[in-house]
Amino acid sequence: MKLPGQGRRRAGKDAPRDTEVPTATTDDPGEPDEATTPDETDGPAATAGPDKADKTDAVGSADADETGEPGEAAEPEEAAEPEEAAGTGKAAAVDATGDRDARAGKNRRRGSSSGGGGMFRNRVRRFLQRPGTADLSRYTKLLPQIAAAEDRLKELTDEELADAAGDAVEDSELCAIGREAARRALGERPFDVQLVGSMAMLSGQIAEMATGEGKTLSGAIAAAGYALAGRSVHVVAVNDYLAKRDAEWMRPVYDRLGVSVAWINQSSTPAERREAYAADVTYAAVSEIGFDVLRDRLALNPDDMVTQEPDVALVDEADSVLIDEARVPLVLAGSAVEGDVDVKIAEIVRELDAETDYEIDEDARNVHLTETGARTVEEALDGIDLYTEEHLPTLTKVNVALHAHALLERDVDYIITGEKVRLVSESRGRVAWLQRLPDGLHAAVEAKEGLNATDTGEILDSITIESLIRRYPTVCGMTGTALAVGEQLREFYGVEVAAIEPNVPCVRDDEEDHLYTTLDAKEQAIVEEVRQTHESGRPVLIGTLDIAESERLAARLDEEGLPCVVLNAKNDAEEAAIIAEAGSRGAITVSTQMAGRGTDIKLGGSGGDRQEIADLGGLQVIGTGRHESSRLDDQLRGRAGRQGDPGSSVFFASMEDDLITSYAPDEGAPDDADEDGLITDPGMHWVLGHAQRVAEGVNLEIHRNTWRYNKLTEEQRRTVLDYRDKVLRTDVALETLGEHCPERLAELRETVGDDVLAEAARQITLYHLDRGWAEHIADVADVREGIHLRALGRGLDPLDEFHKEAVRSFNNLLKQAQERSDETFKTVEITEDGVDLGSAGLKRPSATWTYLVQDNPFGTDLDRAVRSVGRLLGRPRSG
Ligand code: ADP
Ligand code: MG
């Protein structure tokens, strides 16, 4: 291995990027821009018609294929076509590792270990391997080389080591140097498996490594590798606390590699953010990055922007971010306008009869008025006809209020603190401080709870986490649980999973589920289990499904003289400190999913005796119910048995759990339960696993659907943004306005200089563009909400109809923005001091704020349809 060789010196951050640097271009078959590109010269252009947009079956069966989906290139059948692959140079174009990875490879400045020849071999091998996993041999074969460099690297001074890092070309060199840097900086010598993880990430893959394997360090070495190759890296952290912790923890390693690192938190100022984004490696929660992108999108001056072109995203807990939270919209809202709360409608809805006036779907996710209910509401509203076009807004309000009334449960879906509704996010099981329900629904919950409406704002823009991440030309990451969603990661992001064995084999004892007839019997059994384990001195971690359950169980444990600590909605730093002690002798910790995430549970706690606890049998993890996804179960189990520690895990479940009642509802209680309610019938265990698989399938379909609908909006966003950027950075606004209003231009030129005029034209155009976009996304949301019913009523395809309407609205937006700009240009006063849009009633939002919506709990007609299909499939077989 050559060390101070002729490797490419790393390009400085500000150095112009050479042509290899990826930009969002049209060469990606999966990217939305395939269908439309903004007109280069003439300002806003009409976008693609619906004929270009894909038309898929609305309800979208699992195998409905979409043209242009990123996963398409990676179908196994294709991998099995030797002729196509070997014959032409096409192998590279249809790289079986997925387009994202192919690009990562293409864009890598560092020499890639797999040449074109290996590609075909890999494809075949992968085909024989478990689907969705990468071949690790191309990494493991480099390990001896890495080990061989170790002694030599130890001799280098710190300065020489940093120089060697700057010169490193091959991943193997980089890993050897990274190992030495970590040894010096942290006193931890990265294990082979950690370096294999780094190499997988450097190849644009998701490294699956169990909890406690040291992914933080593994990821840092990969991030440094990208940075040393001149790339700009965002390490996407789970939350603010971990962004800061990990960046500071890894800083000494980066320092020794000559790589700059920074982090962003919610409280970071714009100047701090700009500086942080300028570092080689930036750690931040996905929401913070998204909010910055959204805010930049409204900048009136290029200097106000804080973000840069997205380049590499290295995502921690990748499956949560890329799959579980993919559909979560990040929202930028502005201008407090009077809330549209309808207290009256809330009251009407409250009086409705649950038996006759409305029906709740079996999966408790949707509710709708019955005919009787509709009549009751219509009478209460002075006899209007709810189902006419004219009263559509009222019908929407009624539906929203009904949803809040019948489906959203206090202390499960939200809690009330300090007169405010705070959402509880399902998958995180924690209060989401920044989150709001979609506007109408939030107000409806406030009305239901008799609270004063908080300010609602107009949504200025929003972007889903999926769309945000897809902006990055290279996506890679790490998590303990990726394999189960390997196919989805490929489908939605074109990334592959590299499943890496633990450093020390896992010896955790995962017990079979304990299944009970009733909730009460289950909780009684949990308490007994805790008592038994606790008496032995072993620490117990109880993972619950929601906050209400945590509280209930904690109270019950307390009553039984089993004092516990509850982790729910506290702040992340506090939770981290508490969970760090969860492995202490006799500790009982009750925690919702993800609370205290990313923090090690060391046996014996921070100061205690590891061996003592290990001898007792290590940590016991108790799950109070299976989650909607087996990955979440596995994440909980993974809390025990880290790095070869002893430990055990067991889940308790009951036939009354939501999972069963929602997804396997027709399965009654079996006959053969013992006097404690414990079910021994093995068929029932099958039902439990089956319900979970149905839930997973339903969630996948909803994800697919959301993406089908979002795709077009993303194309449109890009079109508008490209044009907006041009307005911001050039004089195109004045040119266009001058063309449209030559007389006005001539008149203004008599008194006002060209620079001032150009700036005024710019501000006018930006104002109307941004307004138009806000109106457009509101329109699109409305269209999407109602399209299913309307389209079905006329025998049309909803997705098609949606596309037609969205394209119409978009074309209208561009046209209207230009007309409004022309009008303003003609009438507004422009002097040497510039233009005062405020005095013309064209005020920008006085304040903006951001929030994220965990999901759209209201769902859409389409989601509903998909769920009912899921339920049909979900009919369990008997016994
Ligand atoms: P993960 O994110 O994979 O769950 P972390 O990155 O939080 O794991 O690391 C878990 C623990 O392992 C940390 O305390 C870290 O200091 C330790 N660790 C990581 N790598 C090594 C190593 N090579 N040698 C010793 N300890 C390590
Ligand atoms: Mg971690």
Image: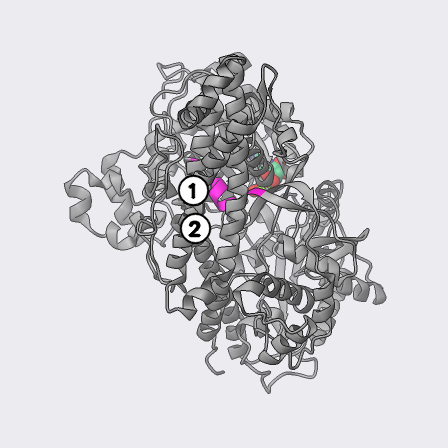
Q: Give x and y (percent) for residue 482.
A: 48, 50
Colour pattern of the rendering: one colour
Residue farthest toward the bottom in the current orientation of the protein: 671
Q: Is 188 inside the magenta-drawn segment?
A: no
Q: Magenta segment, which residues?
A: 460-472
Check if mark 2's residue and mark 1's residue have beta carbons within 8 Å: yes
Residue at which label 2 appears: 806
Q: Quadrant of the N terminus?
A: top left
Vertical comparison of 620 with 229: above or below: below
Check the image and report above or below for 680 versus 836.
Answer: below
Mark 2 / mark 1, whichever is N-terminal: 1
Residue 716 image label: 1
Observer-nearest of 766 and 625: 766
Question: Label 2 amino acid?
Answer: Ala
Ligand 1 occupies quarter: top right
Neighbours of disc 1 within 10 Å: few (<14), some (14-19), many (20+): many
